[in-house]
Amino acid sequence: MEVKKGYSDRSFGSMYLSEDGPNEESVRNRGRFFDSIGLSGKVVVAAGPVHGIGTAFVHAEDPTYIPGTDALITREIGVALSVTGADCFPIYFEDSATGVIGLAHAGWRGIVGGIIENVVSGMITVGADPANVRLHVGPGICSRHFEIRADVLGYFSDYPDAISRVSHDGHTTYHADLRHVIRCRSIAAGISDACVSESDECTFCLPDRYYSYRRDHPSALETQLAYIIMTG
Ligand SMILES: [Zn+2]
């Protein structure tokens, strides 16, 4: 099974899709990006993320925008799954032995809430075997740029190695390494450590390449697009 996946950069412009209806500029940008990666004319299904842990199963005949969900799964060849994000991580799942793919939009709430486990268990219900699943973590925010408030620390109590304390001018800030938590939870969900790979790119660190919500605080969301598709 051939699987193709990727992530846009800001040279294509923002990929953000609003629930309020298509924004003309985003639709144009998405079209340009899809042309460049050979997805023009294919079914591209988009999740409308809400920082939850909801997962939807996708079929070619379904609507191409699924609101209120952060992850998509399909068994269908030629159907592309897509999520948008700018600091949150795209997480790509593939079991090429049984032909099941998934894609998640994962910020800290989704990660500690169980989105990885939800995708893996959803993939199992349609025939995947976690022993075959390969998981790739795309670009997202690094721990240096991901400061968390003290009242959020408790959500990371199982992952002390993910938390760093930085003291400056008499006050302390806390930072979370979300890639580390993703890896821990992926392994706990049954994926082998050797089958987890990750990009080291930080969306905040690379202003020429990526939009970053925490860096830019845009009045209208600007996002990258992640996609995965089985091509045959
Ligand atoms: Zn960074």
Image: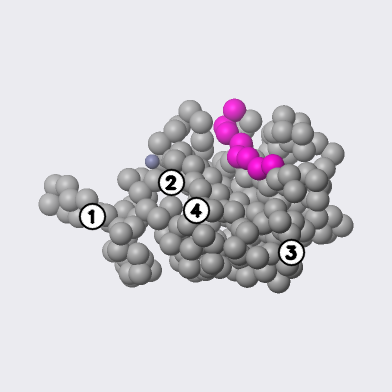
Snapshot quadrant of residue 127: bottom right
The answer to which of 186 and 228 lies nearer the viewer is: 186
- On residue 141, the disc is 2
On screen, 104 above or below 142?
below
Q: Amino acid at mark 3?
A: Phe
Front of the two marks 4 and 1: 4
Residue 184 shown in magenta: no
Q: Report how many numbered discs are placed on residues in the image.
A: 4
Residue at 31% over, 53% down: 175
- On the image, numbered disc 1 is attached to which residue? 165
Callout 4–callout 3 Cβ contact below 8 Å: no
Could you say whether the residue bearing mark 2 is in a helix, strand or loop? Answer: loop
Could you say whether the residue bearing mark 3 is in a helix, strand or loop? Answer: strand
- Magenta stretch in the rendered image: 4-11
User: Which label's residue is closer to the chain start, 3 or 1?
Assistant: 3
- On the image, numbered disc 3 is attached to which residue? 57
User: Which label's residue is closer to the chain start, 2 or 3?
Assistant: 3
Can residue 53 be seen at all in this image of the molecule? Answer: no
| Label 2 lies in ligand 1 vicinity (Cβ under 8 Å) | yes
